[in-house]
Image (cartoon, grey):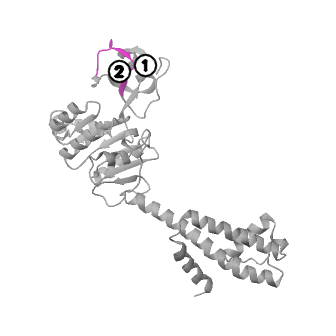
Amino acid sequence: MSIFLLLRMYASSLFHRFGWAGLLIALGVHLTTAWLGLVFLGEHHLTAPATFTYFYLTTTLTVGYGDLAPQTAAGRIFVATWVMLGGIALLTAAIGKTTSSVIDAWRKGMKGKGDFTGKVGHTVLIGWEGASSERVIELLLADETSNDNLIVICDCTLEENPMPGKTDFIKGESLSSAALLMRAGVPGAERVLVRTPSDDLTLATVLAVNQLNPVGHVVAHFNESEIAALASAYAPSLECTSSMAIEMLVRASQDPGSSVVINELLCVGEGATQYLMKLPDTYEATFGDLYAQMKQRHNATLIGYRAKGAQQPSINPPCVTRVQGGELFYIASTRLKEISNGMV
């Protein structure tokens, strides 16, 4: 093993405990004394700022191109002892500390120890249920409105990020913990999805989320419709859904193909999908006129309208229904642009 390799290993372990401030001060002192020593020993061809920087880095990093070298005996001894050995120790420590910091930051994110407090405009998925949660992430990434740069998984059972490169991860002791939800950035998230292994846990989590007054849309999934209704009663601004498996089974038996239609309308991909569009507060029209415009211009089918401030949408309302602001529910092959100036 070469002396330079041994020196690097020793320096890395020696300076590993140093803080960045101490390491940078030591490096600055060494750099300054190296330059002053070359000036004092008459090595003026090495002291120009650009030349010295090049010589210092190639020497202390043991690259050694040989195009620049001290010309006096004293200069050679000074470079071989002080400049080279001291520079190797300090730069190796700096490189090692930088690498260690990057690895620690990566491990921190993988182990769910990050912090997104104050983050806005992202998506938070609370709870993890394996393949079904992976499907949720894939659907979010496939939809252009939620294909943002940050999706945060918030869970208590996972040991590390289950989908690195696609999501970030926050881990805590309880999903209903306000501290954990704050770390995930729930108050500023654009959308929050709650899906846990049990309805009781989902209910507790929904109540905790509601206490944080999130600015984005929150939707929670329950297996039992009664608990979903209870959650809606305590957190009316949140959207609480329940499993429709039984209803779909009955509907499919009475109207064959109904389950296929429902799945098609909810899935992102090829074919028609159900979307929502927010209208400007100044927009006014009748439901019938708006229906005709959307069908003629975009081959989109208008299916419902929710007035501003209303909790429930009106599905297939009469054509004379007055539309003023609010939200539209429609079916189309792609998401439409926002409505402006009274036109679709």
Pointer 2: residues within 10 angstroms few (<14), some, or many (20+)? some
Residue at the location (81% across, 69% down)? Answer: 47
Location of residue 23 in the rendering, given as x and y in whole percent from the top left corner: 59, 67
User: Does 273 appear above or below 323?
Assistant: below
Give the residue at mark 2: 308
Q: How many marks?
A: 2
The answer to if 328 sits in the magenta stretch is: yes
The answer to if 218 sits in the magenta stretch is: no
Q: Quadrant of residue 165?
A: bottom left
- Disc 1 residue type (three-letter): Asp
Would you say the residues marked 1 and 2 are in contact, meaning their CB atoms lie under 8 Å apart?
A: yes
Q: Quadrant of residue 268?
A: top left
User: Does 293 appear above or below 147?
Assistant: above
Residue at the location (81% across, 66% down)? Answer: 48
Q: Secondary structure at mark 1?
A: loop
The stretch of residues the image draws in magenta is 315-329
- Could you give the CA–CA distance between mark 1 and mark 2, rounded to whole angstroms? 8 Å
Give the residue at mark 1: 281
Q: Secondary structure at mark 2?
A: loop
Location of residue 289 in the rendering, given as x and y in whole percent from the top left corner: 39, 15
